[in-house]
Every structure is written in structure tokens, then in C-alpha cells.
């Protein structure tokens, strides 16, 4: 056996030894008698499947302040700044920032990342760079790339062709932004076209859907109806859906039954949603985060993402998924013990489901040996204290170690 991790506390509280061999989890037992080349005493600390970042934009990450800072803090100023910044994108620029961001994420326990790549610029530089990064890092982190038409599928005459090209080049999922199209009709048409493309190229779908405070932005119902009619169901994800927080309750109630029928996935990005949304409100000021608790109570699959790490839309962000979960706990008022545990699921197993990774994800014998050790003993404490991820194992090998901070009182 290559490695034995002794006294690992699982998410359910059970304490066992875990054996890793040849890139796989090969044993999970109360006490492993075997010997291994690498023997690590975990000492009852929490051992978890890695975090899953289900929504981030690696192409714009680490560009905050370039060429200028977003002073209004709005989504729309962010899109304008990005339109300028992306004029100077190069393969090297995107790849260097993407890899730096992936390292930041991996060292904090994230080994699965779904990134959007802007495909509304003529040379497809961002997409090409992220596809190259996806291949370059595959031995230590799994990256999915969504072809995302930031300026709208119908925003410029060539955008639809660029989307087709992106899918031919190998993007994993078709993206969209119906609420940003020029008209409501364009928005509806874009959703239908996204489903046609996904079926034609056999790809997943992840749409930036209703990322606005407008209570009349209702593309989520179109996405859900298309998911029902196409049978694509869990291959479909609606990201953000912040307008859902502003819908009247009668409509939200009706919508919820369609969503349950559709079985689509949801991604909330609480750090950026709480920051970007509600900017046109005075008081009371809306939180602008989708109905995470209610979707979870309905049994729908909800995961969480950063969306942005130091870019034109959000100049903060650390790449630590525990920050994301902690914000969800607060903003979505999920402070009950079961609810906090659910928020931990949203940065782990639920994200894996969104990314359609279930068969390869989780702590089970026979699955790939991807796991993390945290300096704590429960998901609740992990989120409360933003516990340090002390060990990251990827493909059976120890990828990163971090020493927890030491406090000395004099
Ligand atoms: Fe996004």
C-alpha cells in the first residue's frame, strides 16, 4: 500500500483508517494492520472528499483593478471593465492567472473546478487558454470549461458562431446569459438554442440565469421547461438565479413545483450575490441570493461557488470554499445544525453532482484517492473556524501540506 491515513474522522463522525494504493482508495477499516510507504497519523481530524468549486471565472481571475477598479460595484460596470480588459488577453496571460488561481484553490482543498470561459471575443483566447489549462493540470486537479457568451448569444452577429466553434474545440458545457440579451425574446430564444447545442454536441448546460434583481426576469422557468421537455434534467444547471429572491411568493410557489419536476441543479454564489445585487435599492436592501434554503428543502441539488476571485466584478475572494459556505450560512439564514451540514454538502458532494462527477467522487473503496484533511473534527467547526486544510491528496499522492497557524500568548 502506498499510504495509510490513521484515525480519520469521516463526515458522519465515524473514525477509521484509510489506505491508498496506486491512485485509488483501497481500504477503509477501523484498524488497518498493513504497512505502507507513507504512514500519516491523522489523529481524529476530519477527512473529507475535496471541495468542489462549481462556478468560477478563471479567465478573469486576478485582474482586479485592470485597467480600472469597479467603483459602482455593479454587475454592469464589471461587464464594461471586462470588455476593455479582454482586449489585451493573451494565451499566456490567461493561462498564468488560471494556474495561479487553481493552485490557490487546490492548496485550500479544492480539486474539482468548473470554470466559465468568455466566448464573446473574436479569437476565443480565453476558451483556448482554459482548455489548454484543463489538460495541463489534469494530473492534479479536474477542470471543466463552460463556453460562456458574456455579451449575449445574440449580443453581436458573430457570437453564435463563436459558441459553435467553442463547442467544437471541446468545451464541456454550453453557457448562456439570457437576462443580458437585448430583448426578452432574445433571452428566451437563447435558452432554446443552448438546449439545441447541448443536444447536438452532447454537452452539459450551465446558464447564468436571472442574475439580476428584476422580479420580471423569468428565464428560470424557460430553462426548467426545456429541461423537462428535452429530458436533460440533471445535466442542466441554473447559476445565480438571484431574481428568484425577488419573485412574489405566489409565482415562486408555482415555479418551485416546475423546478422539482425538472430536477435541474442550482448554483448560488453568495459572496458575489450579496455584494453585486441590491445595488439599485435604497432600504430595505435586498440580499439578492437565490432561495437556497427552500430549494434545499425541496430536495433539489444546490451547490456553491465563488464566481469571481479578484476580478472586475469582485475584488475580494481567497479561493477558500469554506468562506463561500460561511457566507451561505449567514445570508441564507442556514444556521441550524442540519442546515450548516447542508452548506458543507454544497461545497462537496452537491458540487460533484452538478459537475456530473458522482462515479469518481467521494470516500469509498475503489474510487480515486482524492481527499483532504482538515484541522478540525466536524463540518460545522470547519465552516465556523474556516479550518485549515492540512493535507491535500490528489490521485493518491500528497499534493500540498499546510501548517495551521500557531497562537502563543505571552
Ligand atoms: Fe458567473
Image: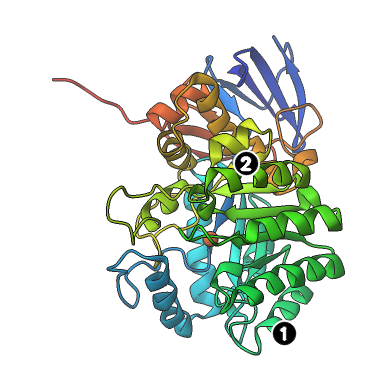
Answer whether residue 375 is visible to the viewer in this image. no
Q: Is residue 235 left or right of residue 141?
A: right
Q: How busy is the neighbourhood of tag 2: few (under 14 within 10 Å), some, or many (20 plus)?
A: few
Q: Nearer the viewer, mark 1 or mark 2?
A: 2
Q: Secondary structure at mark 2?
A: helix
Residue for point 58% across, 35% down = 294
Q: How busy is the neighbourhood of tag 1: few (under 14 within 10 Å), some, or many (20 plus)?
A: some
Q: Secondary structure at mark 1?
A: helix
* Mark 1 in CB contact with mark 2 (< 8 angstroms): no
Q: Is residue 261 left or right of residue 391?
A: right
Res. 161 mark: 1
Quick one: 231 or 216, which is closer to the camera? 216
Quick one: 360 or 5, which is closer to the camera? 360
Q: According to the image, label 2 marks what residue? A: 253
Q: Quadrant of the C terminus?
A: top left
Quarter-wise, where is residue 95 in the image?
bottom right
Q: Earlier in the sequence, mark 1 or mark 2?
A: 1
Task: Give the residue at the far bottom of this rendering.
Answer: 157
Residue for point 59% across, 61% down = 208
| In the depicted structure, whether residue 348 falls above or below residue 170 | above
Q: x and y percent of residue 79 in the render? A: 44, 73
Amino acid at each position: 500500500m502506498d499510504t495509510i491515513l490513521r484515525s480519520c474522522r469521516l463526515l458522519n463522525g465515524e473514525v477509521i483508517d484509510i489506505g491508498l494504493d496506486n491512485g485509488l482508495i483501497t481500504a477503509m477499516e477501523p484498524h488497518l494492520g498493513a504497512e505502507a510507504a507513507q504512514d500519516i497519523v491523522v489523529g481524529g481530524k476530519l477527512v473529507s472528499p475535496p471541495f468542489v468549486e462549481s462556478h468560477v471565472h478563471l479567465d478573469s481571475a486576478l485582474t482586479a483593478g485592470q485597467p480600472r477598479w469597479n467603483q459602482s460595484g455593479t454587475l454592469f460596470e464589471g461587464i464594461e471593465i471586462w470588455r476593455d480588459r479582454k482586449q489585451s488577453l493573451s494565451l499566456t496571460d490567461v493561462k498564468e492567472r488560471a494556474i495561479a488561481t487553481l493552485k490557490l484553490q487546490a492548496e485550500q482543498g479544492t480539486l474539482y473546478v468548473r470554470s466559465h470561459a468568455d466566448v464573446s471575443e473574436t479569437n476565443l483566447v480565453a476558451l483556448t487558454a482554459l482548455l489548454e489549462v484543463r489538460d495541463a493540470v489534469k494530473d492534479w486537479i479536474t477542470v471543466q470549461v463552460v463556453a460562456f457568451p458574456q455579451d449575449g448569444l445574440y449580443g453581436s452577429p458573430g457570437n453564435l458562431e463563436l459558441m459553435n466553434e467553442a463547442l467544437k474545440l471541446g468545451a464541456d458545457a454550453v453557457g448562456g446569459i439570457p437576462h443580458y440579451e437585448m430583448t426578452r425574446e432574445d433571452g428566451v430564444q437563447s435558452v432554446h438554442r443552448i438546449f439545441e447545442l447541448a443536444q447536438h454536441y452532447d454537452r452539459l448546460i450551465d446558464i447564468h440565469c436571472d442574475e439580476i434583481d428584476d422580479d420580471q426576469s423569468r428565464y428560470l422557468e424557460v430553462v426548467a421547461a426545456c429541461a423537462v421537455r428535452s429530458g436533460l434534467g440533471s445535466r442542466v444547471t441554473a447559476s445565480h438565479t438571484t431574481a428568484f429572491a425577488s419573485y412574489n411568493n405566489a409565482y415562486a410557489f408555482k415555479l418551485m413545483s416546475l423546478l422539482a419536476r425538472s430536477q435541474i441543479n442550482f448554483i448560488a454564489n453568495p459572496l458575489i450575490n450579496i455584494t453585486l445585487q441590491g445595488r439599485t435599492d435604497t432600504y430595505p436592501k435586498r440580499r439578492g441570493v437565490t432561495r437556497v434554503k427552500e430549494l434545499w428543502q425541496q430536495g433539489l441539488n444546490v451547490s456553491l461557488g465563488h464566481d469571481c476571485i479578484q476580478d472586475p466584478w469582485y475584488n475580494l475572494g481567497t479561493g477558500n470554499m469554506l468562506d463561500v459556505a460561511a457566507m451561505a450560512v449567514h445570508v441564507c439564514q442556514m444556521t441550524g445544525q442540519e442546515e450548516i451540514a447542508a452548506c458543507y454538502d454544497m461545497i462537496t458532494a452537491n458540487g460533484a453532482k452538478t459537475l456530473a462527477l458522482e462515479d469518481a467522487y467521494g470516500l469509498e473503496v475503489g474510487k480515486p484517492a482524492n481527499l483532504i484533511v482538515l484541522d478540525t473534527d466536524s463540518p460545522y467547526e470547519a465552516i465556523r473556524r474556516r479550518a485549515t486544510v492540512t493535507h491535500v491528496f490528489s490521485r493518491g499522492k500528497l499534493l500540498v501540506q499546510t501548517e495551521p497557524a500557531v497562537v502563543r500568548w505571552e
